[in-house]
């Protein structure tokens, strides 16, 4: 004999599943899919690193204190730029600029 699936419980299960999917679609846009990775570019220069700088330091001493510059200008040989940019996956971008001359 062929056993029959009770159609009433099948319909009830499908209705519950459809309701769950519908409610999941009504949630906000902050549910994390697709995943967006944060983008970080440049050098983050801290106050402690800036406090290490003294007048008369050599280029190598400044490079040791702050790290290698992200940008070096062809027009300004004595200026190093340390831009920093961070864009989280969700949210506003943050940008900082520092210069060492």
Image: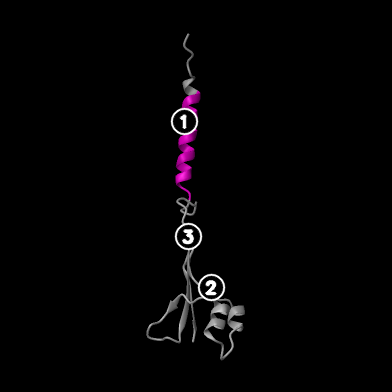
Give yes or no for contact between labels 2 and 3 (Cβ–Cβ under 8 Å).
no
Give yes or no for contact between labels 1 and 2 (Cβ–Cβ under 8 Å).
no
The residue depicted at 54 percent of the width and 75 percent of the height is: 67
User: Which residue was labeled with disc 2?
Assistant: 44
Q: Is residue 46 magenta?
A: no
Q: Earlier in the sequence, mark 1 or mark 3?
A: 1
Residue, far top: 1
Q: Disc 1 and disc 3: Cα gap in Å?
A: 36 Å
Question: Which marked residue is nearer to the observer: mark 1 or mark 2?
Answer: 2
Question: Which marked residue is nearer to the observer: mark 1 or mark 3?
Answer: 3
Q: Which quadrant of the figure has residue 64?
A: bottom right
User: Which residue was labeled with disc 3?
Assistant: 89
- Per the image, label 3 sits on a secondary structure element best described as loop
The residue depicted at 45 percent of the width and 36 percent of the height is: 18
Give coordinates of residue 69: x percent, y percent.
Answer: 48, 77
Count of all numbered marks drawn on residues in the image: 3
Q: Disc 2 and disc 3: Cα gap in Å?
A: 19 Å
- Per the rendered image, the range of residues in magenta is 9-27
Nearer to the camera, 28 or 38: 38
Give coordinates of residue 21: x percent, y percent.
Answer: 46, 40
Q: Residues within 10 Å of mark 1 (few under 14, many from 20)?
A: few
Q: Is 13 left or right of 54, judged from the image as shown?
A: left
Q: Residues within 10 Å of mark 2 (few under 14, many from 20)?
A: some
Give coordinates of residue 79: x percent, y percent.
Answer: 45, 85
User: Which residue was labeled with disc 1?
Assistant: 14
Q: Disc 1 and disc 2: Cα gap in Å?
A: 54 Å
């Amino acid at each position: 004999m062929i056993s029959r699936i009770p159609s009433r419980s099948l319909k009830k299960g499908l209705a519950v599943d459809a309701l769950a999917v519908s409610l999941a679609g009504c949630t906000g846009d902050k549910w994390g899919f697709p995943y967006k990775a944060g983008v970080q570019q440049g050098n983050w220069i801290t106050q402690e690193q800036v406090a290490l700088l003294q007048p008369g330091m050599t280029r190598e001493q400044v490079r040791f204190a702050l790290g290698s510059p992200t940008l070096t200008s062809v027009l300004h040989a004595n200026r190093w730029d340390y831009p920093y940019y961070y864009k989280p996956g969700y949210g506003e971008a943050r940008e900082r600029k520092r210069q060492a001359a």
